[in-house]
Amino acid sequence: MKIESLDLPDEIKRFYENSGILELYPPQAEAVEKGLLEGKNLLAAIPTASGKTLLAELAMLKSVLNGGKALYIVPLRALASEKFRRFQEFSVLGMRVGISTGDYDRRDEGLGINDIIVATSEKTDSLLRNETAWMQEISVVVADEVHLIDSPDRGPTLEITLSKLRRMNPSCQVLALSATVGNADELAAWLDAELVLSEWRPTDLMEGVFYNGIFYCKDKEKPVGQPTKDEAVNLVLDTIKEGGQCLVFESSRKNCMGFAKKAVSAVKKTLSKEDRETLAGIADEIIENSETDVSSVLATCVRSGTAFHHAGLTTPLRELVENGFREGRIKIISSTPTLAAGLNLPARRVIIRSYRRYSSDSGMQPIPVLEYKQMAGRAGRPRLDPYGEAVLLAKSYEEFVFLFEKYIEAGAEDIWSKLGTENALRTHILSTISNGFARTREELMDFLEATFFAFQYSNFGLSTVVGECLDFLRREGMLEKDPDALVSTVFGKLVSRLYIDPLSAALIAKGLREADTLTELTLLHLICSTPDMRLMYMRSQDYQEVNDYVIAHADEFSKVPNPFNIAEYEWFLGEVKTSLLLMDWIHEKPENEICLKFGIGEGDIHATADIAEWIMHVTAQLAGLLDLKGAKEASELEKRIRYGAAPALMDLLDIRSVGRVRARKLYEAGFKSTAELAAASPEHIAVLVGPKIAERIFKQIGRREAVSEFSDIEPLEKGSSDGQRTISDY
């Protein structure tokens, strides 16, 4: 099916033809035949790189040019940024594109001027809770990676969000996209959607198992040279020799870093002079963006053409690795499975070194087929690779047979709603009532009847869980006591708008009421005791040290559990450890020192601080509403958590590009405010923080005439990093 033949405005056809897309892939043509351009709901369950995003683009562009507005929902902020950059290319068609991924208590009404809005499912949910007016104008909703409805953490939010959008805008077109859904027909039926189910790919995918030096696929065998003792390194070298790149998936951060280091000596020999020069530049940028031991290892690997990628790295470092790989300079990325979750980063060969993951309940267990398919689907770059290969490694014949049966010849598992627990429903019931979607118990049950959970389970057991949630919300003062009506209190409405779990809000309110004193530690531990906080893992060596700290500071905790209640006390120690990380952060401990002390990565520090900043913001808001002590203290701590610094640096830190390290350097040099910086000589500031940063500072504070003075000034020291975060990092 030719682009020219589609029922689209001519300017859209020209846009795609000018970008080299003249004809649709078979699954795309099937989607058009099933009503994609006629406003029909559609579920496309087709392989990675088979053109799912193009389907969304065609539907969105047609709808917008007919006066509509499109919402593109993604699971990850990184994926939101990637889609936003792509959709900005539609500006030549007069399209305005916006993105919204943070600040969960904002309406973002200004986004309504855009034709296409990209948002995470959590942000979409928060926009609905905050009754953002333009949400009622949405004519097309795209749910990318819709199989994540199966996720215990994120699935309920996506499911409720889609249910609300369909209830609010009954005529809105819904497009659900996924590479792997076992029960696609069931999901399509719930969405009242046409189903496009296909295994077609633009590049052939050969899935198989590597055993005894041979790559075995279903219908062929391929010997691989053995120049080293490591089979995975040999597979990498074989791929590079044929002009391709590799993604290697490992079971842990430690393993993916270890493999990138292991492959260095072999991969380095394959690099051209041009490769080495470009890679040296990327490595220098890594050093400039971070001062941790891990980033030094990463830079060393990158100089040799290898890299690792995991959530312990900061967003800028991950982006440097991704871009270096897309440019073909980095030959291999060793990653945890997070990289498989939607980012457009394909490779000639995908190597899955470990198909087992650690579970605290049952130890090392085989991964689901769905997860394997997500990783395998990264193999084969359209228009660049003649084929793609997904390789599992077997150490014995028994394992070889098992891997073929378990993964190569198996279909993805069915996905199941995870909405039917009190933990999942509590927050969504409150928001449903606060938004006016339900004013009585009958209306609430009627709304929940439209969820995927009710579709799959026929509402089995849901009424009991709903009753427990309503009892909790009334008991905590978030709903009026009237048994015949469902009405949010002012407290309940604020909890819903702040996008916090009602249990977290109840714990915060109780903690503020009961605390005798409110020190930094008291407030930090209070937010770390909520279910919304992600706690640090307790290592065996942590117990004694954290316990000693608890004993020494017992009067600063609102409550210390009985140490003989082992499970409760261990959980408490995890809360305290997380609080101590945040204490080090706001007291300006160097990031490398924090990483080594807590056994985490830079990315973990920023992710933990990001969540803590949000919950501390909630704490300040709740304290203000309920007239409780701590509103001022929580508000000050919120800002300190954002920047990771002491109160004295806050004025300097309001300037973008001046992070905690540079702010401290300026402060110690006598520049303690924006006003003092404005009066400083450009040369002095450039020597302290470097000419580029100094130039940005003077632009922001209004001294543009000083900008031209920076070109010949050398900084005092190179390679420093401030660890400064912006909202786009998340």
Image (cartoon, rainbow, N blue to C red):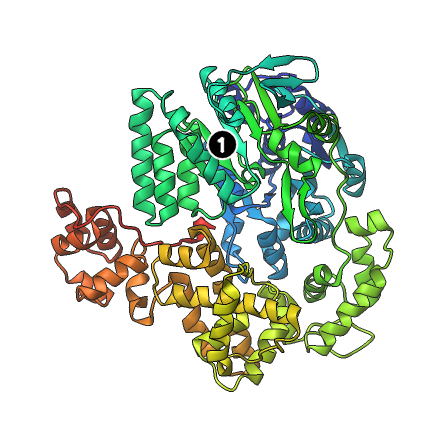
* Left or right of 274 on screen, residue 573: right
Q: Dividing the picture into quarters, in which one does residue 374 lie?
A: top right
Q: Amino acid at mark 1?
A: Leu
Residue 156 appears in the figure: yes
Disc 1 secondary structure class: helix
Residue that mark 1 sits on: 93
145 vs 489, nearest the viewer: 145
The mark total stands at: 1
Q: Is residue 446 above or below residue 19?
A: below
Q: Dividing the picture into quarters, in which one does residue 372 lie?
A: top right
Q: Is residue 487 above or below residue 417?
A: below
Coordinates of residue 242 in the picture (x, y in percent): 48, 15
203 vs 711, nearest the viewer: 203
What residue lies at 85% left-to-right and 50% top-to-bottom? 457
Coordinates of residue 645 in the picture (x, y in percent): 35, 65
* Left or right of 450 on screen, residue 510: left
What residue lies at 68% left-to-right and 30% top-to-bottom? 37
What residue lies at 75% left-to-right and 68% top-to-bottom? 469
Q: Dividing the picture into quarters, in which one does residue 285 lie?
A: top left
* Left or right of 515 on screen, residue 564: right
* Left or right of 589 on screen, residue 438: right
What residue lies at 32% left-to-right and 57% top-to-bottom? 659
Residue 84 appears in the figure: no
Q: Give the class, few, some or many, for how many residues have Cα within 10 Å of label 1's Cα (few <14, many ≥20).
A: few
Coordinates of residue 392 in the picture (x, y in percent): 62, 28
665 vs 696, nearest the viewer: 665
Classify the position of the N terminus by image quarter: top right
Q: Is residue 346 above or below residue 188?
A: above
Coordinates of residue 677 in the picture (x, y in percent): 19, 62
